[in-house]
Amino acid sequence: MAKPRAQWVCQVCGRVSPRQMGRCPGCGEWNTMVEVVEERAPAGPALAIRAEPRPLTEVETEELERLALPMEEFARVLGGGLVPGSLVLVGGEPGIGKSTLLLQVSTLVAQATHRPVLYVSGEESIRQIKMRAARLGLKTEGVFVLTETGLEAILHHADRLEPVVLVVDSIQTVTSAELTSAAGSISQVRAAAARLQWWAKSGGASVFLVGHVTKEGAIAGPKVLEHIVDTVLYLEGDPFHTYRLLRSTKNRFGATPEVGVFEMREEGMMEVANPSEVFLAERMVNAPGSAIAVTMEGTRPLLVEIQALTSHTSFGHPRRTANGVDFNRLLLIVAVLSRRVGLRLFDQDVFANVVGGLQIGEPAADLAVAVAIGSSVRERPVAADLVLVGEVGLSGEVRAVGQIEARLKEAAKLGFRRCILPKTVRRARLQAPKGLELIPVRSVAEALERGLAL
């Protein structure tokens, strides 16, 4: 009998250690190492060779036959549709709308394909799922519901039903009888995901796994699931706003990071066809401290309003608060405005906010943040028909960004007439859309002078 092998695995970063440690050597967190016991396979004859190496030039390729989804925003994030045999992980904070979204997708797939869809829930009863479907007004023909946590039982019913899509909500509740560890442990989650992956690849059905997000922001603790699955989707959003972003962080069948925009209503997760118009709908024109940035979410350009407010500090050290903007980028921009432009910010509290609960990570919004802060300090509004695109460098220069053509087309589509952008982009002989004037600048100081209304 092979002796069980014990390992210690970090629940946050997945770092493996042969012995117990109080502090993870990978992420530095305390008390996150848990013991995982794995059975070693008994020694036996060598495995039979099932495949031979082939030259890559002789391998024939064929187009992936995607399953068309009636929900365009969801299909966009998946890369154009659902690939048969794929394993998709959907993560998000509790109550963000993961179960609601996947229940809607299940009903739409069943109606479009006229084939059964199996929805497995380990946290809710059948009555609760039925009540949600009735509240959302969904047509549930072709959707089968199962409340089960045993992995073997789930696969047994899936083999009998042969669904086109299998939804497991959530993967942390699934347990295998072959393991003695508790539900939600690393070994159980990893074993369940691996078995479901094998079932999906062998049968051609698509599997959705719902994963909870920990306080560190990782799905199911370690990164084990993200390595096993084909696609990783995160459902994000501010709990005080109705808008939700479905973001793709890994996709073996499409581009990343792609994003879909939804609005949480009584009818469920409703698609937002033009997010830029929604995020700018409540904008107060000619208000100091407001600027419009053109950011890219995957292949989609979005126009968002960035607000900034400066006020005299009441403490010895001024505060810097960022909501929707990276905090370190805000500190960099404030330092550039103080040192390179000459704005007096050492005794001012600076607040930056992205309207709508969005999170902007790309540096193309730096120029809009800088101009919004300068507008608040000087009490001069930014022109209402102006958008800003550009990255801010430590020398106060404005640097070029990618996908500028798509950004300009979206700005012109929404009626903006002027755009401040880096001068290096203008040198590339960029053709401006009709009705949009390009204002090339070299520095942040020049952008402030050109952007603030007289």
Image: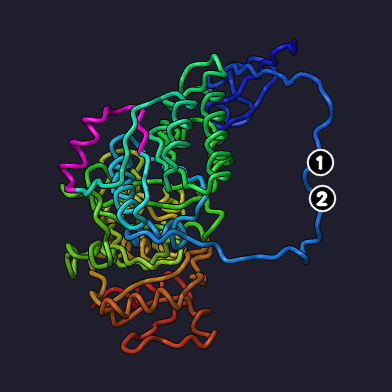
- Drawn side of residue 188 relative to residue 68, left or right: right
Secondary structure beneath label 2: loop
Q: Dot 1, crowdedness within 10 Å: few (<14), some or many (≥20)?
A: few
Range covered by the magenta-colored residues = 119-137
Number of numbered callouts drawn: 2
User: Is residue 126 covered in magenta?
Assistant: yes
Of residue 161 and residue 434, the one placed in the foreground of this image is 161
Q: Are marks 2 and 1 in contact (CB under 8 Å)?
A: yes
Measured in 3D between alpha carbons, the distance from the residue under mark 2 to the one under mark 1, in whole angstroms, is 8 Å
Residue 190 in view, yes or no: yes
Residue at horizontal 80 percent and vertical 57 percent from the top: 54
Task: Give the residue at the far front of this rendering.
Answer: 160
Residue at horizontal 54 percent and vertical 25 percent from the top: 186
Q: Which residue is mark 2?
A: 52
Quadrant where the C terminus lies? Answer: bottom left
Secondary structure beneath label 1: loop
Vertical arrangement, residue 83 with respect to residue 63, above or below: above
Residue 164 in the image: x percent, y percent? 43, 48
Vertical arrangement, residue 108 with respect to residue 200, above or below: below
Vertical arrangement, residue 335 with respect to residue 416, above or below: above
Residue 247 in the image: x percent, y percent? 41, 52
Of residue 373 and residue 1, the one placed in the foreground of this image is 1
Task: Give the residue at the far right of this rendering.
Answer: 45
Kind of residue sitting beneath label 2:
Glu
Query: Looking at the rendered structure, which numbered label has been put on residue 49?
Result: 1
